Amino acid sequence: MSFLAGAVTRVKPSATMVLTQRARDLKNSGRDIISLSVGEPDFDTPDHIKEAAIAAIRRGETKYPPVLGIVPLREAIAAKFKRENGVDYKASQTIVGTGGKQILFNTFLATCDPGDEVVIPAPYWVSYPDMVTIANGKPVIVPTTLKSGFKLQPEDLERAINPRTKWLLLNSPSNPTGAAYTRDELKALTDVLMRPKNQHVWVLTDDIYEHLIYGDFKFFTPVQVEPGLMDRALTLNGMSKSYAMTGWRIGYAAAPPSLITALDLLHGQQTSGACTIAQWASVQALNGPQDHLPMFRKAFEDRRNLVVSMLNQAKYLKCPMPEGAFYVYPDCSQAIGKKTQTGKVLGTDEDFITELLNQEGVAVVHGSAFGQGPNFRMSYAASTKMLEDACSRIQRFTASLT
C-alpha cells in the first residue's frame, strides 16, 4: 500500500514553477539567463498601498482576522463589484483568501464529489486541472483553436455538458493566451448555461487579469452579462496582477451564501484568515487612487505590441495578438521536426523551449503544459530592453534551425 494518497500521485508539478526554478539555477551558476516563464508584474506595489500596510502595523492590526476577511475589505470588495462590474453582491457574499489560488482550490474541494466534472477550456492555467483532480473531480478539457481566438465556442460547451457536470471554469483575459471574451461571446456561453437542461451547471470565472486589457476592448464578467446566473456563480478576483501585489497573497471572491459558508468552513480548518496587514493594504488598493492602472496598461500594451511584432519576424513562429493579460502564446508547430545546432531534433514544444533555454538562455513555458500545443507561453511582464533582447535571441534560435 502506497504511503501517499492517490490524488497526490496523480498531480503534476507546476510547469511554470519548474521552468522558473531551472532558469534561476542556471542564472546562479553564472549563465546569462532571461526568465520570462513566470506571470508576475515587474512594477512595484503603488506607494499608497504600502503606506496603508505600514499604518496598519502601527495601529496594531496584527492579530488574527476573521476567517472570511476583515469587514472593511469585504465591504470594499462588494463596492468594487458594484462600481466596476455593475453587479450587486452583499459584503456577506464575499470571502478573502490567501491568494485566489486558495479560493479556487477550496471551491472544488467544497463542491466536487468523486466523478463530478469541471469543464475547462484549453489552453488553461496549469493549476486548474490538478486542483479538480485533488478534489476528486474530473477535469473535462475542451480544446479551442487559434481561429476562434483560443475561446470556448457555445456548441463545444453544449457538447461537454452532461448530468455530472458541476462547473464551467472561465478565465478572461486568459493565462496563458491573453484571449478575452467580448460581451457577445460571453452571452453566447451563458445562454447555453441558462437552458433548462443545463440549470445544474455553475460558472466559476477567474477575472484576475480584469484591468489588464488593451486598445478598445471592454471587460465583462459572466454574471454581469447574465444576472440569472447569480445564484450559481462564483466570481473570483485578486490583488496580485492589477495592483502588483503578488507577494501580499490576497485573493477574493463573491458567491451565493451557501457556497461562502462552505468556503468559510474549509478556510477555517485550513489557514484561518489571510494576513491582516495585507488585507488592510487591499482596502486602500480597492478604495484608493487607481492612477497606476492606466500606466500599467500602457506599458504592457506597448510591450505586447513589441513582442508580437518581433516574434512574428522569427522563422517558424506565428504569434497572435492577445487582448489582455501579459502573455503571448506563439505557435511553434513549424519548428517541430527541425534540428538544432547540436543536432537535437525538436519533437515537441517542450523540446523547443528546452533547447531555447540551453542555446540562448531564454526561459519560457511549453504550451503542452497548458493543455494545448505545439506553442509556448512567454510573459512580457519585463522591461522593454529585456524583451527586445529575449526576442532577438528567439529570432537567432529559430534562424539556426535546419
Image (cartoon, rainbow, N blue to C red):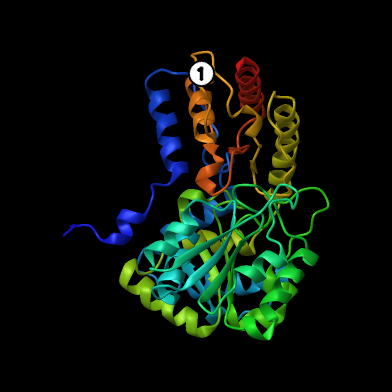
Point 49% across, 51% down: residue: 126
- Whether residue 107 is visible, yes or no, is yes
Residue 178 drawn above or below residue 91: above
Check disc 1 and report its element: helix, strand or loop. Answer: helix
Q: Residues within 10 Å of mark 1 (few under 14, many from 20)?
A: some
Residue 66 drawn above or below residue 172: below
The quadrant in which the C terminus is found is top right
Residue 152 in picture, x, y percent from top left: 68, 60
Residue 144 drawn above or below residue 38: below
Residue type pointed to by label 1: Gln
Res. 87 image quadrant: bottom right
The quadrant in which the N terminus is found is bottom left
Res. 201 image quadrant: bottom right
Residue 114 in picture, x, y percent from top left: 39, 73
Point 50% across, 34% down: residue: 350
Q: Which residue is label 1 attached to?
A: 359
Residue 388 drawn above or below residue 342: below
Residue 177 in picture, x, y percent from top left: 64, 47
Point 74% across, 73% down: residue: 225
